[in-house]
Image: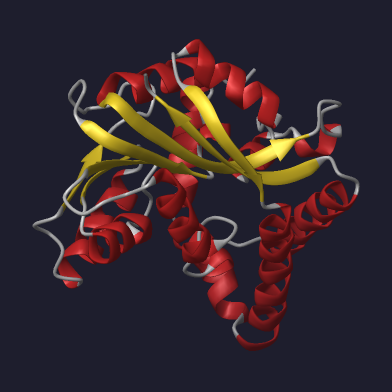
Amino acid sequence: MTTPEEIKSCCATAYGQDAVALVLGESYHPGGLALTRRLADVVGLRSGQRVADIASGPGATACTLASEYDVRVDGVDLGRAAVERARAAAEKAGLAGKIRFHLGDAERLPLPDNTFDALVCECAFCTFPDKGSAAAEFARVLRSGGRVGITDVTVAETGLPPELTTLAAWVACIADARSVRTYTEILAGAGLRTVRTEAHDDALARMIDQIEARLGVLRMTATDRLTEAGVDTDAVLRYTALAKQAVADGLLGYALLIAEKP
């Protein structure tokens, strides 16, 4: 049985590798920066606020929020390689004075209590083994009246086929995704009241299509890059086919949730 620590380590390692960047391109989550901006707008970001970006990855969201919304951002990620890339991205964008990146676990955030006006977590909450602890940490670092903005994979109440509950599927943000109702219950357990939900299933479907198209092009033009990065194209395409069918069957979706700390 894979332990929670092993799962978290595997996810962090995978998303720090060149293979992920090669397959996903610049956007590591459905909807890309367009959905990030939608999330920021609905959360209600304002100039001068402090924002926590949990599972901040290579820093695209943090840089976008700092530059376009004039906020100060603390990003947290479990992957050392991701944190280093994010710091380099912020430096290159001239945003090092507005963004700090920390190596840390979402279930034990290296951030102070009652400090942040908003917290965002994109396509990552579903991968946290102990979602209740992560939600409690979200509540801890938010000030009173602060808001959590989450975009994430959702599953139907009936669950997923076994093929989409493997470790590889977990890394792909599918295996431990929950229904919107369950996400709201987890947040409520931490004292965070959900005030808005939106369905963005089309963003997930488009991302699957983009991955398949990108792999098709790379197979024809850059097979050596795929080999060097260790990408098993056939395995990836098997998962995308299963995921695409699950979306078509209404088993997989993508949602935006906003919750507030009283």
Query: Is residue 173 in sight in this rendering?
Result: no
The image position of residue 257, as x and y in percent, is: 55, 38
Residue 217 visible, this angle: yes
Q: Position of residue 19 (x, y in %)?
A: 52, 62
- The relative height of residue 31 versus residue 242 in the rendered view (above or below) is below
What residue do we see at 19% from left, 29% from top? Answer: 115
Relative placement, left or right, of 244 versus 188 is right
The picture places residue 152, in percent across and down from the top left corner, at 59, 42
Give the quarter of the figure containing the C terminus: top left
Camera-side residue: 169 or 98?
A: 98
Would you place residue 144 above or below residue 250 in this image?
Answer: above
Q: Please state which of residues 234 and 74 is positioned toward the viewer in this rendering.
A: 74
Residue at the image point whose x is 29% and y is 32% from the top: 104
Q: Left of 156 or right of it: where is 199?
A: left
Q: Nearer the viewer, residue 243 or 189?
A: 189
Quadrant of the drawing holding the N terminus: top right
In the image, residue 244 above or below residue 193:
below
- Is residue 177 toward the left or the right of residue 194 in the image? right
Check the image and name the residue furthest to the left: 97
- What colouring does the structure picture have? secondary structure
48 to 22, vertically: above or below: above
Left or right of 119 in this view: 50: left
Q: Which residue lies furthest to the right in this view?
A: 249
Give the residue at x 36% y 61%.
60
Residue at screen point 82% across, 28% down: 159
